[in-house]
Structures are given as C-alpha cells and as structure tokens.
Amino acid sequence: MSASAAQRAKTAERRAQAIQLKLAGLDFETIAQRLGYSSRQAAHKDLQRALARNLALEAAAADELRHVELMRLDRLQGAFWAKAVGGDIKAGELCLRIIAERRKLLGLDAPAQVEVITLDAVDAEIRRLEAELGRLGDAAQADEAAAATGAED
C-alpha cells in the first residue's frame, strides 16, 4: 500500500534534514539519534535513497533539457537547410555548426582511444623477445644434441 501524501512529505523533510546534517559533518550515528532513525544503518540507507532519487530527478531534468535543445537545433537547421543545399555558403556553414552542436549534445564525438608506446616499453619488449629467442635456440640445440646422441646408440 502506498504511503499517504502526508507521510511522503514527512519522509522528504526527514531526508532533507539528514542531508543537511551529513553536509554539516555529522556521522550516521548522530544523524540517526537526532532524526529518530532506528540505527545508523537506517539513517545511511535513507540518505542513500534520497541521493539516488535526487540523481534520478536530475537525470530526468537533464534528459528533458537535452530534448528541448535538440528540438531548437532541429528548427534552426530546418530554417536554413533549403538555402544550404541550394548553395548558400553562409547557410551551409550555419547548418554545419548546428550539426556539430547536435553531435556534441548527443555525445557522438567521443574521443578516440590512443595507445602511447614509449621507447622504454619498446626496449623492454625487445629484451623480452631476445630472451625468448635465446631460450628457443637453447632448446633447439638441446634437441639436436639429444637426437645426435640417440643416433649414436
């Protein structure tokens, strides 16, 4: 059964107070005692719920703002698109800037991953490969010696 509006308001107020007390530097034990939680774990859990709810609300607001901004960019691009494809250089440049803004807003221009290899790393790999080749050469010589010894028997 869902909590009443009055209970939800009371919970929201207590969570707001818990956040303020935590911001003031109080530990969860003290917050629990001051606000009537059953334990410090209960105070911690309730504060985590409040923060998660707040993050969800912020994410929803950010999504809504992103949607509005995308609609604005669409309207701007639509207003200049015909001129741009018709050869108007300034309209074309404006449309390209609008497209760039849209790409930024949507995160389509994520940076490429670049692997940096230092000379020290290259030298270390060369030494490792030389050592491996040395071991393989030693093993091959041992096999040849064993084969020669076996042929003499």
Image (cartoon, rainbow, N blue to C red):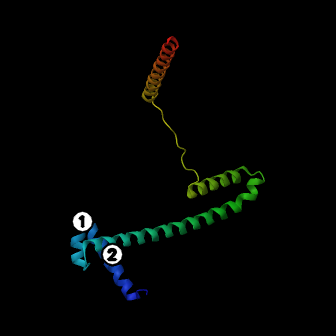
The extreme front residue here reads 153
Q: Which of 100 and 24 is in front in this view?
A: 24
Q: Which residue is drawn at 48% across and 22% down?
A: 136
Give amino acid for label 2. Answer: Ala
Q: Quadrant of residue 36?
A: bottom left
Q: In this view, does 34 lie to the left or right of 94?
A: left
**Mark 2 lies on residue:** 16
* 65, above or below 130, in the image: below
**Mark 1 lies on residue:** 25
Indicate the secondary structure of the residue bearing disc 1: loop
Count of numbered labels shown in the rendering: 2
* 45, above or below 78, in the image: below
Q: Where is residue 116 in the image (x, y as percent from the top left)?
A: 48, 35
Contact, mark 1 vs mark 2 (Cβ under 8 Å): no
Q: In which quarter of the image is residue 72?
A: bottom right
The 10 Å Cα crowd at callout 2, few under 14, some 14 to 19, many 20 or more, is: some
Indicate the secondary structure of the residue bearing disc 2: helix
Q: Which of 35 and 85 is in front in this view?
A: 35
Q: Is residue 51 left or right of residue 78?
A: left
Q: Where is residue 101 in the image (x, y as percent from the top left)?
A: 59, 55
Q: Which residue is drawn at 72% across and 49% down?
A: 89
Q: Where is residue 78 in the image (x, y as percent from the top left)?
A: 70, 62
Give amino acid for label 1. Answer: Gly
Q: Position of residue 88 (x, y in %)?
A: 74, 52
Checking the image for residue 134, the label placed there is none
* 113, above or below 107, in the image: above
Q: Which of 24 and 51 is in front in this view?
A: 51
